[in-house]
Amino acid sequence: MESSRDAVIVDAVRTPIGKRNGALAEWHPVDLAAEVLTALVARTGIEPAAVDDVMFGCVNQLGDQSTNVGRMAALAAGWPEAVPGVTIDRACGSSQQALHFAVASVLSGLADVVVAGGVEMMTRVPLGSARATGMPYGPRVRARYAREAFSQGEGAEMLAERYGLSRTACDEFSVRSHTLAAAATDAGAFAGQLVALPSLSADEGIRRTSTVDTLANLKPAFREDGVIHAGNSSQISDGAAAMLVTTSERARALGLRPLARFHSGTVVGDDPVVMLSAPWPATHKVLARAGLGIDDIGAFEINEAFAPVPLAWLAETGAKPERLNPLGGAIAVGHPLGASGAILMTRLLHHMRDNRIRYGLQSMCEAGGMANATIVELLP
């Protein structure tokens, strides 16, 4: 590997996030993914033939999302047949992992220009579809954790119990998410990152009238006396996002002005039963690798799979609460699984640019008890 090579993100775009059975429901995932690829070309002026690979995250790879959506998206966008594509599954972190793989390819010299992104149409391929047949996890894993259930909802209840998070605290965080997302939308904070679609121009899931009192009427979803319910959990959603990754040298040669440099990244494993607790060890590890402290980071995107996840992350990291998900999160706008990593990074990069924030950090819990963590640095 050439020591002088770096990896930069030139641009990042996303679709508005649609509610389940909402405005994006009729879109085929391949066609929706093609929209963000087309937008990247339009925004950067890059020739699709210059792209060495398309790496897309997608979790439920069956039905409409089978047969390698990464490759099919490039074909649907009209890109040359010579441009390959691959589809990646690291559960909810699939498109964040796609970014890490794209960066690794560029840093190693295996590629010079890569598109990383993701898509998930949970309306068309419902959550849990891949577990409908066969034996998920396999007999040896099931034997190893014989008395445990692999349930993210139950894991969220475990976190709430472990960190002393009441239902009120979780509901207050939910209201915060909706309030911040609505304010960001009204202020135009997402305008520079969204791909305009005929059927949807803004994130569809925001509930502007959400209050702790209204959330109190919702029934717990996983335990009769639990704190987790539909209102303080991420929404089931549809969406896609994509980022253009290259080197500083190649960007200059192509006349491109990057948004940010990929500074550091990691992925960790943790308890697969609690399943949601890996973002804090991932955060500690990536900060150590980067040689940075928690206060050096000006903005954090920690996926709001369930309210206890970012709240427990705050408790474990000591981060400033106002820097956490400043534009709201998945509780308000949704969590289209395989697209969420790229969506969070798109939100983070544009927020950093708009507010002149030098360092940003992203992490998200992933099924199986894993988490990616990524630090990016704004370029002048």
Image (spheres, helix red, strand yellow):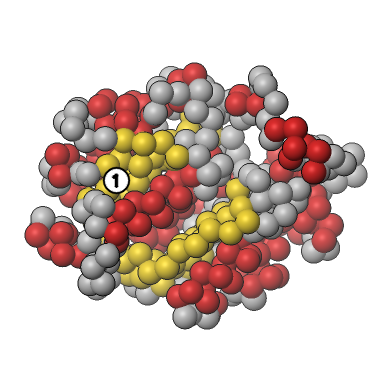
Label 1 element class: strand
Between 255 and 94, the residue placed more toward the observer is 94
Q: Residue at x 35, y 46 (%)?
A: 116
User: What residue do we see at 51% from left, 69% from top?
Assistant: 286
Q: Amino acid at mark 1?
A: Val
Would residue 134 appear left or right of 50 to someone viewing this image? right
- The answer to whether any part of residue 213 appears in the image is no
Image coordinates of residue 341 in percent, x first then y, are 47, 49
Q: Which residue is mark 1?
A: 115
Q: Quarter holding the N terminus?
A: bottom left
Q: Position of residue 145 (x, y in %)?
A: 81, 43
Q: How many marks?
A: 1
Instruction: Tell me where residue 168 appears, x and y as whole percent.
Output: 79, 56
Which image quadrant is residue 358 in? bottom left
Given residues 290 and 294, the one toward you in this image is: 290
Residue at (68%, 57%) from the top-left corner?
270
Neighbourhood count class around disc 1 (C-alpha, 10 Å): few under 14, some 14–19, many 20 upward: many
Q: Is residue 281 above or below residue 332?
A: below
Residue 333 in the image: state x and y as whole percent. Answer: 53, 44
Is 376 displayed left or right of 177 in the figure? left
Residue toward you, 190 or 255: 255
Q: Is residue 279 visible?
A: yes
Residue reaching furthest to the right: 225
- Left or right for 21, reference 239: right
Residue for point 58% across, 71% down: 284
